[in-house]
Image (cartoon, rainbow, N blue to C red):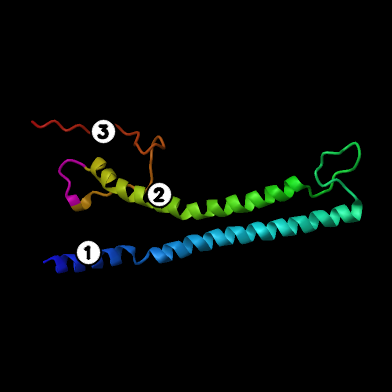
Amino acid sequence: MIEEFKLATKKAQDSATGFTIWVGLANGGIMASFLVSYVALTLYGAFKLYSQVRAEGCDPSNTLDDLNAACRITGRAVFGALMGVSIGAMGLAQIGGAGEALLGAASACHPALEAINRKVGSDVDEIEAPLTTEGDGQGFNDEEPEIVVPV
């Protein structure tokens, strides 16, 4: 009996933890891609900045206006580009989750809209939720509800 329990527990553990290596590899790949982009953007920005300083003798920090003219590309611009690319990449990853949440919400609201729009005496197959909202734009119709009083 104990051997069967150990075998079942081992099997459950293996099936639950078998995919974690792929999750770790995916997270490591994401981290590596960010680090590579940081290195690439920093080196390219430093090259562009150094080229201007060498050619024109300008100020890369843009702090010495009275002594030296500022460069067209400053250190702040290079850092801003680096942060913009990395934050933009993180934001792009959220679009799929947001779209999935919106589709899930629409799927969850459909049965409620069918129940709201049902009429007394109608067959269940005839009730449909409207695809567009009419009226006040909040999902409510401007028409008065029909009140049926049994006689």
Q: Mark 3 points at which residue?
A: 145
Is 74 left or right of 90, judged from the image as shown? right
Q: Is the magenta stretch mostly helix, strand or loop?
A: loop
Q: Does the magenta stretch include residue 51?
A: no
What amino acid type is highlighted by mark number 1? Thr
What secondary structure is found at the residue carrying circle 3?
loop
* Residue depicted at 16% across the width and 49% down the height: 123
Quarter occupied by residue 40:
bottom right
Residue range highlighted in magenta = 119-124
Whole-Å distance between the Cαs marked 2 and 1?
Answer: 38 Å
Instruction: Give the vertical position of 147 relative to 46 (above or below).
Output: above
For disc 2, the neighbor class at 10 Å (few under 14, some 14 to 19, many from 20) is: few
From what the image shows, is residue 138 above or below residue 31? above
Q: Do the residues labelled 3 and 1 touch (CB within 8 Å)?
A: no
> Alpha carbon of mark 3 to alpha carbon of mark 1: how far?
59 Å
Question: Which of pointers 3 and 1 indicates the residue nearer the eye?
Answer: 1
Q: Quadrant of the N terminus?
A: bottom left
Q: Which amino acid, mark 2?
A: Leu
Sooner in the amino-acid sequence: mark 3 or mark 1: 1
> What residue lies at 90% left-to-right and 42% top-to-bottom?
68
Residue 9 numbered tag: 1
Tell me where residue 137 sits by quadrant.
Answer: top left
Residue 91, percent from left and from top: 54, 51
Of marks 2 and 1, the one in the foreground: 1
**Left or right placement of residue 113 versus residue 150 in this view:** right
Residue 64 quadrant: top right
Residue 116: % across, % down: 25, 40
Q: Is 110 on the left or on the right of 3, as rendered?
A: right
Mark 2 highlights which residue? 102
